[in-house]
Image (cartoon, rainbow, N blue to C red):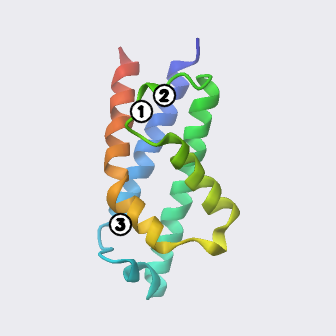
Amino acid sequence: MYDKSLVVDILQQISNAIETIQKRFEPIKTVNDFTDTPEGMEKLDSICMLLIAIGESIKNIDKITNKELLPMYPQIDWKGAKGMRDIISHHYFDIDAEEIYNVCDTKLKSLLSVIKDIQKDLSY
């Protein structure tokens, strides 16, 4: 058995990071809002840093739970989330702003919902 309280703490950190990304992403309406101004690039950089933290935290959950917890929630592409972390970390100068935009626009809401579901499930 794994340390549920540790996993719950990590899930809360992921939840907080997603909510921070969502706040920072609110004024971004197009990819150009990231790329055309220094302020947009700062937002892109800060969002990428949090995406790295989320991916690393997901990897840690897999490690702590012997890869048994996350597969119970197949609606999320966990491998993709971890892969995003690797791409941003190791190929930072080749980051595709459009891909980051798409992740923020289409993936984070469902990830947050599932993270909250996992938190609830582990609270029982």
Residue 34, quarter of the rendered image = bottom left
- The residue nearer to you, when weighing 62 against 8, is 62
The answer to whether 73 appears left or right of 45 in the picture is: left
Question: Is 116 drawn above or below residue 81 in the view shown?
Answer: above
Amino acid of disc 3: Phe
State the image coordinates of residue 120 (x, y, percent, origin top left): 33, 24
The quadrant of the image that shows the C terminus is: top left
State the residue position of label 3. 25
The answer to whether 59 appears left or right of 43 in the picture is: right
Q: Residues within 10 Å of mark 3 (few under 14, many from 20)?
A: some
Q: Are marks 1 and 3 in contact (CB under 8 Å)?
A: no
Q: Which residue is painted at 52% across and 55% down in the image?
A: 51
Mark found first going from the N terminus, 1 or 3:
3
The answer to whether 34 appears left or right of 85 in the picture is: left
- The residue nearer to you, when weighing 4 against 112, is 112
State the residue position of label 1. 74
The quadrant of the image that shows the N terminus is: top right
Amino acid of disc 2: Pro
Q: Which numbered dot is residue 71?
A: 2
